[in-house]
Amino acid sequence: MVLAAALVLSMAAGIVVGSVGLSLDEVFTAIGARLGLAGGIDANTVHIVVNLRMPRVVTAAAVGAGLAVCGAVLQSLTGNVLADPYLLGMSSGASVGAVLVITTGLGVGLTAGIGAVSVAAFIGALGALALVFAIATTRSGALLPNRLILAGVAVAQGGAALTSAMIYFGDRDAAAIVLRWTLGSVAGARWPSTLVVLIAVAATLAVVWWHARVLDAFTFGDRAAASLGVPVTATRWILYLTVSICTAVLVADTGIIGFVGLVIPHLARFAVGPLHRRLLPVTALVGALLLVGADIASRVVLPGRELPLGLVTALVGVPVFVVILRRHGAPA
């Protein structure tokens, strides 16, 4: 309840804070005016609140929750404490797709310009994921964690090299745009894309919650899970695909935002333990709270200039992770 209340307050602050200062009364009046329940407020304020800041704040919360939960699930499935949502090379694949559009303009006419980058990033992320699965899948159809991690590293390195080549041979303006995209932002969030993100995150939360007890079993290894009647191969495929598709949607919409999916699951484990029925909700709430707070910080730290979200999360995530390791040792 405390985390949920903190999240609501932080989201309210995210709507109030900005280049145009607003009060909570103006925010509620603007929302009421859009719903036809209030009046006496100018159309520009309604537009700022309803069409610009609300989707931005909701997107930040959903992306933070999604990345954190995906990171927690991948850490459990792979037994790797350093696993994060980009483990399977999807960030590099998304970068390849986004950079291809930014540097060449390919597909802009088909997807109305700005949307072309998101579409290409999503396709690139899914392409990288398919390649990783093709490399890592054994002849029996199993997905072995160590093999999957190595395949993800290989695809990520290949994607990074291809991205670097396109940037190197592109113009300087394109390189600046690519840098901003790779550092992540929710500044361009609008309701259509926000709804897509919400659906993806909600579906992912539902699937992983349903498999919470199975994830507990995976903590003790595949043999232990199988002895409890868990269909190991099928379950791994379901969970890997679920969190991977969710990650692809998130990275396509906001760019690459690091450390949320790595650090937050460990914070949640230290707070509530490793059982996923408790871990997953806390992870989602803390991830949402962190990213909403990071988005607010990105707007107020430097007056007149907005910091990339990935930069803010890195500045927060690195010291927090070091403190965790110093005080508690390696997370379980």
Image (tube, rainbow, N blue to C red):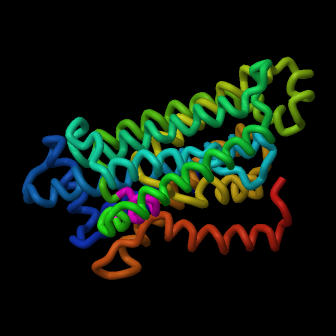
Residue in front for this viewpoint, 303 or 139? 139
Q: Which residues are magenta?
A: 177-186
Q: Would you say residue 243 is visible in this rendering?
A: yes
Label tally:
0
Residue in front for this viewpoint, 50 or 193? 193
Q: Residue at x 89, y 37 (%)?
A: 220
Q: Is residue 244 above or below residue 52?
A: above
- Taking the magenta stretch, the answer to whether it contains residue 76 is no
Residue 218: image location, x then y, percent:
82, 34
Residue 88: image location, x then y, percent:
64, 43
Residue furthest to the bottom in view is 303
Query: Would residue 53 be found to the left or right of residue 120 on screen?
Result: left
Q: Would you say residue 278 is visible in this rendering?
A: no
Residue in front for this viewpoint, 129 or 320? 129
Residue 260: image location, x then y, percent:
59, 57
Residue 145: image location, x then y, percent:
78, 38
Q: Residue at x 75, y 29 (%)?
A: 143
- Taking the magenta stretch, the answer to whether it contains residue 178 is yes
Query: Would residue 4 be found to the left or right of residue 19 on screen?
Result: right
**Dominant secondary structure of the residues highlighted in magenta in the image:** helix
Q: Is residue 265 above or below residue 300?
A: above
Q: Residue at x 50, y 70 (%)?
A: 312
Residue furthest to the front in view is 169
